[in-house]
Image (cartoon, rainbow, N blue to C red):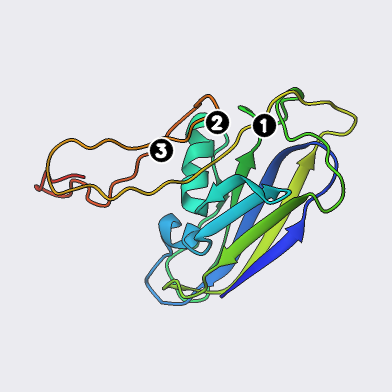
Amino acid sequence: DRVFTEDLPVNPLSMLLVTLRGVVTESDTDAPLADILGLMPAVGVSFRGQDLVRGSLADLAVLNAVVCGAAPWGTKPQDGDGETFAVTVPICFGRRPYLVKESLPAVRRGDLVLECQVDTLVSNVDLVSVQIETVELLDETPEAYLKYTTASHTFGSTGEEDVRLPIGNPLLGVLLQGTTVPAGTATTAT
């Protein structure tokens, strides 16, 4: 359990690749993807203190899969104690990976900072390691980039609700997540 920060490269960035590796700790149990992604409840990239990316790794994985077409990949453990897993989640700075005109522009050293919170108290996994890689676009001059923000709103028990959205930038996508989903014969949903 810790929060770590790292300076990111100065060249234009197309995306970050966040890889989680670990070992399943219970026999006859696999580690669901939600548990594995739950190992990083907070990921952030800031430019001179202003957030460009802020969210849980699970939310960022869904947004990048749907909006950018860059789904997570990796190896799934087989049932059993001691089986290893690895999951890589791309976090894109353009609408698609490797877009020359859509990525983070070049910055000065120390201006772009990655901050990650790792929570190792997730059940069924142990010996977790985190690897962060960057995809740089050398000698390019990007014109636009994506910004990820997170806002929480607790809904009332019934009726319609208004949710305030961030202003100042055009919206490319919005992820809404409910805590109650239909299961079995129950049709209850958030």
Query: Can you give x and y, in whole percent of width and height, for residue 71 in the image?
Result: 54, 39
Query: Can you give x and y, in whole percent of width and height, for residue 54 in the image?
Result: 55, 49
The mark that comes first in sequence, 3 or 1, is 1
Identify the residue at horizontal 41%, vertical 73% (top origin).
123
Q: Are marks 1 and 2 in contact (CB under 8 Å)?
A: yes
Identify the residue at horizontal 18%, vertical 48% (top origin).
156
How many other residues sit within 10 Å of disc 1, few (<14), some (14-19) or many (≥20)?
many
Identify the amino acid type marked 2: Gly
Q: CA distance from mark 1 to mark 2?
A: 8 Å
The mark that comes first in sequence, 1 or 2, is 2
Q: Quadrant of the N terminus?
A: bottom right
Q: Which residue is mark 3?
A: 175
Q: Is residue 164 left or right of residue 84?
A: left
Q: Secondary structure at mark 3?
A: loop
* Observer-nearest of 66 and 163: 163
Q: Which residue is mark 2?
A: 69
Q: Residue furthest left?
A: 185
Identify the amino acid type marked 3: Leu
Q: Which residue is mark 1?
A: 97
Identify the amino acid type marked 1: Pro
Q: Quadrant of the C terminus?
A: top left
